[in-house]
Amino acid sequence: MAQVPYYYVKEGGNTYIDSLGEERSELFVEYKEGMARPLSQVADRIELLGHTLKHCEREFEHLSRFNDFDNQRLTFDELKEALASIDANAISADYGEMGEDFGKFFRRQIFDRLGLGSRTKDPDYVRYHASEGMENLSAYSILRLLALNPQAQHLPVTWQFADVEIGGWANRGAFVRPLDQSNRFLIVTEGSSDAKIIRHALHLLKPHVSDFFDFVDMEEGYPFSGTGNLFRFIQGLVSISIQNNVVVVYDNDAEGLANYVRNRSLNVPSNMLILKLPDDPDFTQFNTLGPNGHHPADINGRAAAIECYLDLGDNPLVRWTSFNTKAGAYQGELIDKTEYMRSFLDQRELLPGYAYNRIQRVLDMIVAACMTMREAQMNKKLNEL
């Protein structure tokens, strides 16, 4: 919660003529309770709701058909470039009349402010024929496109709900509430340490989207320890056609790789993702210890469990343990992996000098996959309209 600006027209206040020659009312500002986040963070949340750039383009094309305007006279790229280059700091909060006729708001207020007259081949057509379609473009798509603008990325997106609440039109719970379950993702891993590390990494590195992710309750003992149990659990979820969004994350070791490949053969529903921790260039020449002594080796797909993606200091070492017949490779384990994990989980804020790059890549992989899943779900809704 924060104190955010609310804009009002002063009754009997002064008026002035703007740069377009239109009369404007002088505004005054009051600060009241609301919510605010930088646009760059809001854009990440919007993408996890499925409003990716690809979906924005699909929505634009859908609206052009629904509202019967030629999207070759106003193309998606022209709209994207206009929002990405507009001087966001120079836009006035005064939009003239309120309650303008449908389409009139775009014609009178938005078309010129975006400079579309100089960007389109047929500006008169766009002003009058694309107006209703553009007013139907969702706020999510507009914000996502505006987030491409370097000037706008750090500007606050504010939610001014105080007047609506005070006026009795809605209660606070309509605005200040957790994400709907349909917009969340259940992360399922091979063991409790994987889930603990990923959850803690989200809170440290991506706190603005951490509430999108749930984890299996580990307080009473983790129920899916081991890749064999996890495979059977996934089979069960597939068989009951689970409705939640589920993301399964396997380790990047011999056992995890074998079961990842095995799971990929299942006919998993569109709301389920099967992932493996990513290969990492840092692991191609990793110090290992086996029957033949110390040798550098590539541990991708052989010994890269979640702890390997933490800061391992100067001399980390993997011990080869057994041969995995399913993967056709030796399985290895990071020595002192519990100490690496505890050191990470003890952090309450980002530490200078700590190497977060590998665990950051893990989070980026998971988040990108979730965005793609939700994008497909949103596109399906568009196709059903």
Image (cartoon, rainbow, N blue to C red):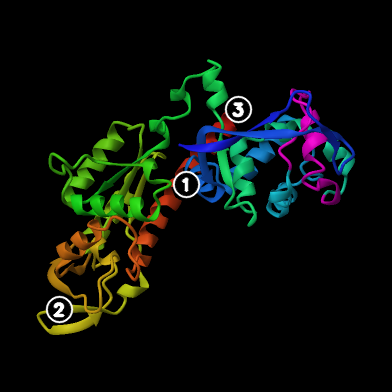
* Residue 89 x %, y %: 69, 50
Query: Is 113 placed above or below 335 here?
Result: above
Which quadrant holds the N terminus?
top left
On whether residue 169 falls in the magenta region, the answer is: no
Residue ID at (33%, 69%): 355
For residue 94, what is the image quadrant?
A: top right
On whether residue 100 falls in the magenta region, the answer is: yes
- The residue indicated by pointer 2 is 289
For residue 137, what is the image quadrant?
A: top right
Task: Tell us which disc is closer to us: 3 or 2.
Answer: 2
Q: Identify which amino acid the numbered label 2 is placed on.
A: Leu
Is disc 3 surrounded by few (<14), some (14 to 19) or many (20+) residues within 10 Å? few
Q: Identify which amino acid the numbered label 1 is placed on.
A: Met
Residue 45 appears left or right of 153: left
For residue 261, what is the image quadrant?
A: bottom left
Of the pair 104 and 263, the residue shown nearer to us? 104
Q: Secondary structure at mark 1?
A: helix
* Residue 226 x %, y %: 16, 51
Task: Tell us which disc is closer to us: 1 or 3.
Answer: 1
* Residue 64 x %, y %: 73, 36
- The residue indicated by pointer 3 is 385
Does the image show residue 285?
yes
Q: Are marks 3 and 2 in contact (CB under 8 Å)?
A: no
Is disc 2 surrounded by few (<14), some (14 to 19) or many (20+) residues within 10 Å? some
Is disc 1 surrounded by few (<14), some (14 to 19) or many (20+) residues within 10 Å? many
Tell me which numbered mark, 3 or 2, is placed earlier along the sequence: 2
Residue 371, which numbered label?
1
Of the pair 321 and 165, the residue shown nearer to us? 165
Q: Secondary structure at mark 3?
A: loop
Q: Which residues are magenta?
A: 92-119
Query: Is 149 placed above or below 30 here?
Result: below
Tell me which numbered mark, 1 or 3, is placed earlier along the sequence: 1
